[in-house]
Amino acid sequence: MKRANKTPTVKNVFRIIKNVLFAVILTFLMSVVVLTFITKISGKTPFVFGYSLQRVSSESMKPTLEVGDIILCKQCDPMTLKNGDIITYEGKKGQFRDKLVTHRVIKEPYEENGEYMLLTKGDDNPDEDSAISVNDVVGIYTGKADILRPLFEFFVTPWGLLVMIALIILAFLEDIIIFVKALLGIDTGEKKDVDEIIRKYRDKSPAPEGGEDTGDTAAIDAVVESISDESDGDNAEG
């Protein structure tokens, strides 16, 4: 007997595309949330492929950067920084201690007491910052990621976390249902009806000439009868 070729239906193709897109979006959202919490908990800036996302939390860089802006920072060699560059650095003194600060360079790296230092200032601040070591530079500002702003503002809230959990459950809902049904001993409906297969086989099988079964037909019938007996046994146990 020739086995029918299995060709993907439009429904199956659509399901595959939907699952792939859903997985990409979910992975991206989870990455954004995880990176945000790592930054808050550890105080360190996680980088992915040399880039990091930062959220502006003060008005010191108005009008260039507004509160709530999501900016992209790139790791760099601090010795190459020039006047006018916007950088993010780790504060070590005064009001900026243990905070990430994004300000503009107003004096390029210079040597002082055997150490290279920088001077920065917020565009909207009247005074310059205290001098910082080039070793405190986290990265250089490369641009805004405006499309991510609503995601940041939503997914770091309690409601956002609930939505994230719901999305994860939804992504694996089908597997969860199958698993629960298996635990409860409920038929998942994934197996085909053996009796229906046997009936179709017998209806489609041509009658042998002379009323005698050929060797192949007899062998196939034996297999079918065996499957039928096993199916009946399973039904009896159930």
Image (cartoon, rainbow, N blue to C red):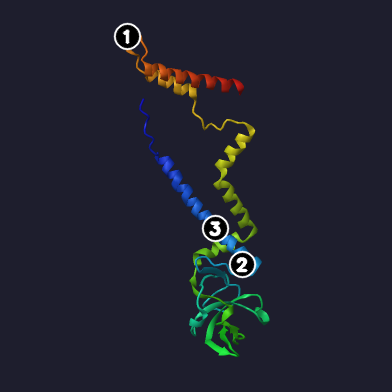
Residue sitting farthest toward the right: 94
Tell me how far mark 3 sits from mark 1, CA to CA. 70 Å
- Comparing 59 with 76, the one in front is 76
Q: Taking 176 as reference, is 53 above or below it?
A: below
> Badge 2, how many Cα within 10 Å: few under 14, some, many 20+?
some
Secondary structure at badge 2 equals: helix
Task: Tell which tag, 2 or 1, sits nearer the viewer.
Answer: 1
Number of labels in the image equals 3
Query: Which quadrant of the rendered structure holds the N terminus?
Result: top left
> Badge 1, how many Cα within 10 Å: few under 14, some, many 20+?
few
- Comparing 133 with 70, the one in front is 133
Give, as a three-letter code, the residue at label 2: Thr
Residue sitting farthest toward the top: 210
Give, as a three-letter code, the residue at label 3: Leu
- Comparing 198 with 27, the one in front is 198
Q: Taking 40 as reference, is 2 above or below it?
A: above
Q: Earlier in the sequence, mark 2 or mark 1?
A: 2
> What is the x, y in percent for residue 187?
57, 30
Give, as a three-letter code, the residue at label 1: Gly
Q: Name which residue lies at 40% across and 39% down.
A: 9
Q: Name which residue lies at 64% across and 67% down.
A: 40
The image quarter containing residue 201 is top left
Secondary structure at badge 3 equals: helix
Q: Name which residue lies at 66% across and 82% down.
A: 93
> Badge 3, how many Cα within 10 Å: few under 14, some, many 20+?
some
- For disc 3, the marked residue is 29
Task: Tell which tag, 3 or 1, sits nearer the viewer.
Answer: 1
Secondary structure at badge 1 equals: helix
- For disc 2, the marked residue is 39
- For disc 1, the marked residue is 210
